[in-house]
Image: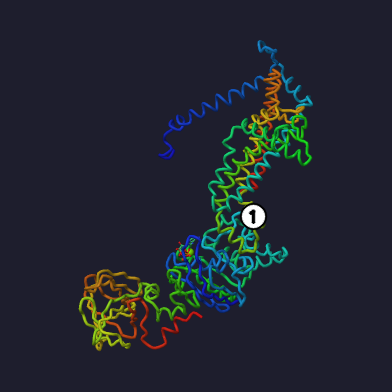
């Protein structure tokens, strides 16, 4: 029935076992626990719990702070994904044209990715420290008072900058690889077909990068939703006044700081549904547009 | 409608390789020039400098008398068909063909009309909505042609446009390109390394070698009067036979000591080593020419029946290379057979030690060599 090279039934499973084990233990198990937890109310010490139906969800969905966090998350994610992708694309296009010292240039641009989120956060925190910071000092000189500990908009801008800076390298690597894989003759043909550099970029290069851009959009959305926790925690801890509290951060705050396990679990279930839905939407509607 | 003039064009790549040395060429209006030469001789480089994709290091390029060295590819009004076709994968066939017109700011209706007309001409009307990856190799090639034709440019450039097709399609497309080029009357430069393609397509042929023009002229002129040993060996299939001979008082001597009573019409000092070139079709059996004095005794080592003809690969003692003879297809030759061959003086080409043709009749070689 199956071709000779597919006859080994057991080997693939043995090879996949470690990875499957990790995914089961560290993803599916906690996820199932969270779903279960979301339907119970627990006492403050975690000694007893009681089935509560949809009460936790009701409580979360009628909380104004939850909607604030949702709004913050949307603004934050959109800004991070678009910012990190467009800056990375710009840098990749320029790096693609560099001939001398190209490797040094590329290595330097990839470095931020190797920096841990918390360290990246601290770095930006120093630069923008209201009293000691280098950049906040410069901003002060030109009359812009910087204090992200009081100003919610500035705080949000700061975590966006730090998160963009961190994610940019990842996008840069992918965009650069995609650019270098583009057949040169296509751009030459376009040049002969009377398209200037600007037009060549928008009618040839950009459409041909769209599969890469789509992949990065999915990855960046997930990054912005989940992996920016460390950055936010070190830079603003969700403040001031909840201005930088994203959904993930709120899950952490309510669950581990506020000790309200039921509400926290309900939020993470909602968050999972939200990201799942978003990813489904991206694949369903955007992916079709980027195939050629 | 355009004339193209190359005046001492030189191309030096940044890595120090000089790919073109002082190329001089005049292309007259409506002419199809074929540039032919072995791999790496600079054919693509020549086309790319004409198109403006590579900067010209030295010399002058003019189109209709106007210097275009400094112009961008877009400003030269040139269309190019690439070897890999370079079709835009994310655009339909119609999109590919209309791209240049759109960039020019032509109204949509006008674009549609012109694309439809060109598609009709090339038999692409049914395929206009398809993407390049949904086409066969031959269809892609046609689209690449269509993209060039629809622009009605001053000059067409073709870089080995048929090399990715199978043999049959290649012959068919070759005829089609010839027909289209004559019909449209657009000045064209066509690059190939296939000498059959070159001979059949060209109004004039340019043979290149190591970045230099070896010779240029009509295909028949080059075939009959090759200016150098290189051109003589490059054109013609199977290639010309070369006999290294030493000039002697009453003729020439072969390496094996055989004397041939050939009165070379030009005075050459005795003892001078030269190359005598004879094409396979000009070697005939000595029995048919009782008056000849130049007889080569050879042994047949291998036969290649081609139908109408039969190629005999024969061995002449003292010669390393085979002597190839084109016999009649019905010839009863067999391997190991001995043959006596001869040729007439009028059919042989003499080249001196550095590969230049030694002129047999004054003026003929000089005429064939003029490129301007
Ligand atoms: N971008 C480049 N940089 C440096 N040298 C190059 C470059 N392109 C081509 N060359 C060199 O220039 C010479 C001519 O190359 P070209 O591509 O013009 O040859 P060609 O005649 O088109 O060969 P083919 O029949 O294989 O296509 C070669 O020696 C090649 O190595
Ligand atoms: Mg080439």
What is the x, y in percent for residue B330? 30, 75
What is the x, y in percent for residue B308? 36, 74
Q: How is the image coloured?
A: rainbow
Element class at badge 1 = helix
Residue at x 64% of width, y 29% of height: A230
In front here: B52 or B191?
Answer: B52
In front here: A75 or A235?
Answer: A235
- In this picture, is B225 found above or below A287? below
Residue at x 76% of width, y 32% of height: A147
Res B180 quadrant in image: bottom right
Give the residue pinned by disc 1: A201
Q: Quadrant of the N terminus of chain B?
A: bottom right
Number of labels in the image equals: 1
Q: Is residue B235 left or right of residue B73?
A: left
What is the x, y in percent for residue B233? 37, 73
Q: Is residue B287 left or right of residue B196?
A: left
Residue at x 73% of width, y 64% of height: B107
Category of crowding for the residue at label 1, using alpha-carbon neighbours closer than 10 angstroms: few (below 14), some (14–19), many (at least 20): some
Q: Residue furthest top?
A: A47
What is the x, y in percent for residue B193? 44, 68
In front here: B292 or B33?
Answer: B33
- In this picture, is B57 found above or below A51? below
In front here: A79 or B36?
Answer: A79
């Amino acid at each position: 029935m199956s071709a000779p090279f597919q006859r080994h039934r057991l080997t693939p499973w043995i090879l996949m076992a470690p990875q499957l084990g990790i995914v089961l233990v560290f993803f599916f198990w906690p996820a199932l626990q969270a779903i279960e937890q979301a339907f119970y109310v627990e006492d403050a010490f975690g000694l007893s719990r009681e089935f509560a139906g949809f009460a936790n969800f009701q409580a979360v969905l009628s909380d104004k702070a939850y909607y604030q966090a949702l709004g913050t998350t949307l603004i934050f994610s959109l800004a991070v994904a678009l910012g990190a992708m467009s800056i990375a694309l710009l840098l990749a296009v320029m790096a693609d044209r560099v001939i001398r010292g190209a490797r040094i240039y590329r290595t330097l641009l990839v470095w931020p990715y190797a920096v841990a989120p918390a360290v990246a956060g601290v770095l930006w925190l120093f630069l923008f420290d209201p009293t000691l910071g280098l950049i906040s000092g410069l901003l002060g000189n030109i009359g812009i008072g910087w204090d992200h500990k009081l100003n919610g908009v500035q705080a949000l801008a700061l975590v966006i900058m730090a998160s963009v800076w961190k994610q940019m390298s990842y996008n840069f690597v992918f965009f650069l690889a995609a650019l270098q894989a583009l057949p040169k003759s296509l751009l030459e043909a376009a040049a002969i077909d009377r398209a200037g550099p600007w037009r060549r970029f928008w009618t040839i290069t950009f459409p041909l990068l769209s599969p890469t851009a789509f992949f990065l959009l999915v990855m960046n959305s997930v990054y912005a939703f989940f992996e920016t926790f460390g950055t936010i925690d070190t830079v603003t801890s969700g403040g001031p006044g909840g201005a930088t509290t994203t959904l993930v951060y709120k899950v952490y705050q309510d669950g581990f700081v506020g000790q309200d396990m039921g509400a926290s679990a309900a939020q993470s279930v909602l968050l999972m549904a939200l990201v799942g839905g978003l990813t489904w939407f991206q694949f369903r509607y955007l992916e079709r547009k980027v195939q050629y | 409608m355009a004339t193209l003039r190359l005046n001492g064009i030189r191309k030096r790549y940044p890595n120090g390789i000089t790919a073109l040395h002082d190329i001089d060429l005049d292309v007259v209006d409506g002419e199809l020039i074929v540039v032919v030469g072995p791999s790496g001789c600079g054919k693509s480089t020549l086309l790319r400098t004409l198109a403006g994709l590579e900067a010209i290091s030295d010399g002058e390029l003019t189109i209709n008398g106007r210097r275009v060295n400094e112009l961008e590819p877009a400003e030269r009004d040139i269309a190019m068909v690439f070897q890999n076709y370079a079709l835009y994968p994310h655009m339909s066939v119609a999109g590919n063909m209309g791209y240049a017109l759109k960039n020019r700011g032509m109204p949509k209706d006008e674009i549609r009309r012109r694309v439809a007309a060109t598609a009709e001409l090339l038999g692409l009307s049914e395929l206009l909505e398809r993407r390049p990856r949904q086409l066969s190799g031959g269809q892609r090639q046609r689209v690449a042609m269509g993209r060039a034709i629809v622009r009605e440019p001053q000059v067409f450039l073709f870089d080995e446009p048929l090399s990715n097709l199978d043999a049959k399609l290649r012959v068919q497309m070759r005829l089609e390109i010839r027909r289209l080029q004559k019909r449209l009357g657009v000045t064209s430069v066509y690059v190939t390394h296939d000498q059959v393609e070159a001979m059949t397509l060209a109004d004039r042929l340019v043979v290149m070698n190591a970045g230099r023009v070896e010779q240029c002229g009509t295909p028949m002129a080059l075939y009959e009067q090759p200016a150098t040993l290189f051109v003589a060996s490059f054109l013609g299939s199977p290639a010309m036979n070369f006999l290294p001979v030493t000039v002697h008082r009453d003729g020439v001597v072969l390496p094996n000591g055989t004397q041939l009573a050939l009165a070379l019409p030009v005075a050459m000092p005795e003892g001078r080593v030269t190359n005598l070139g004879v094409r396979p079709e000009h070697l005939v059996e000595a029995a048919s020419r009782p008056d000849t004095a130049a007889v080569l005794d050879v042994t047949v080592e291998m036969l290649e029946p081609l139908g109408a003809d039969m190629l005999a690969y024969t061995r002449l003692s003292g010669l390393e290379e085979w002597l190839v003879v084109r016999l009649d297809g019905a010839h009863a030759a067999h391997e190991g057979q001995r043959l006596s061959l001869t040729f007439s003086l009028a059919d042989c080409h003499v080249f001196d030690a550095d590969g230049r043709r030694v002129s047999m009749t004054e003026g003929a070689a000089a005429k064939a060599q003029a490129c301007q």
